[in-house]
Image: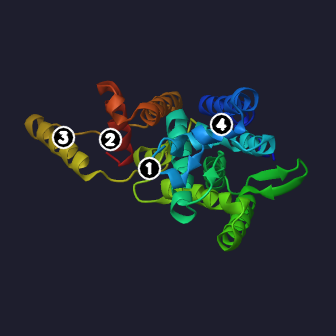
Amino acid sequence: MATATEDQEEARFGITPAVAWLLAINIGVYFVQLAIFGERNVFAALGFDSVAMPAGWWTMATYMFVHAGLAHLAFNMFALFTFGPRVETEWASRGFTAFYLWCGLGGALTHLILVRSGVLVGASAAVYGVMLAFAIRWPDEEVFIFGIIPIKTKWFVGWMIVINLALAMASQRGGGSSIAAIAHLGGLLFAWVWIKGPGSGGIERLRRRVAAIPDDGDEMPRAVPKPQPRTREASASRTDAVVAKSMAVTPKLLSPPADSRKRRAEELNRVLDKISQSGVESLSPDERTILERFSRELRGG
């Protein structure tokens, strides 16, 4: 598989930090499993055995770094390398890592609830979640299967969901190795809840609420932010008080020059990137002022 667009070349062909760490940990664990401890011992120590719960609860996290064979590892790591960097670039490393682990946890919980037998290993649930996030964000981007067959990501991921549904139903009837498909579906379900559920978001939704920065820096932001009643009322009260005391007339400001607009857009992007990495609480007073100023400008005052 390979993605096929011209944009975001660095994210597409480079390895972003969280993806690099995940690749290294998975490959490292497989090497240790193969060369030192042996598959059975690693499965017993790190694989998720639902029958043994609640003992070994930590294996709900460790199982996703253990793989049952080279082909299993190769598919998951190639899919993570293909789809992960673009998603991490959108969400920042911390958000991407939390999402990845959340999807892996979803796979373990679904396995625990619906299967209750066998030892679960592999990053597939987490990787399927990343694939779904990519397909939701870039649905019409093409993936080349086996390097030659083009298919849009929305159809590719949709087809993978259908396959896993079929395997899950078969495993419920007759068991077998396809029970892992239920964990895959759990990862997909948890990914959907993260992306689309109540309270979900990400930096792009934050950008739309505060101010959308256009692709062309010479243009002013075009999206109207979501109103913030309390902030707006407080700001209006302060403005009214100042005007009442000074009896001043507020002139209509001319549009700033293009270079100034571009510089201020870059400032806002920097502040929003900081929010995505460290949270709103990390902003300095000056950065909060930048955020409030852009929000007021887009509301027309």
Task: Check disc 2 and report its element: helix, strand or loop.
Answer: loop
* Label 4 sits on residue: 41
Q: Which of marks 2 and 1 is nearer the N terminus?
A: 1
Amino acid marked by disc 1: Pro
Comes first in the chain, label 3 or label 1: 1
Name the residue at 67% across, 34% down.
26
- Circle 1 is placed at which residue position? 54
Location of residue 20 by image quarter: top right
Q: Which of 45 and 266 is in front in this view?
A: 45
Q: Which amino acid does label 3 sit on?
A: Thr
Chain-order first, disc 2 or disc 3: 3
Q: In this view, does 212 lie to the left or right of 42?
A: left
- CA distance separating discs 2 and 1: 66 Å
- List the residue tagged with mark 2: 252
Disc 3 is placed on an element classified as: helix
**Residue 108 in view of the camera:** yes
The percent coordinates of residue 137 (x first, y second) are 62, 52
| Residue displayed at 66% across by 45% down | 122
Q: Name the residue under label 3.
A: 239
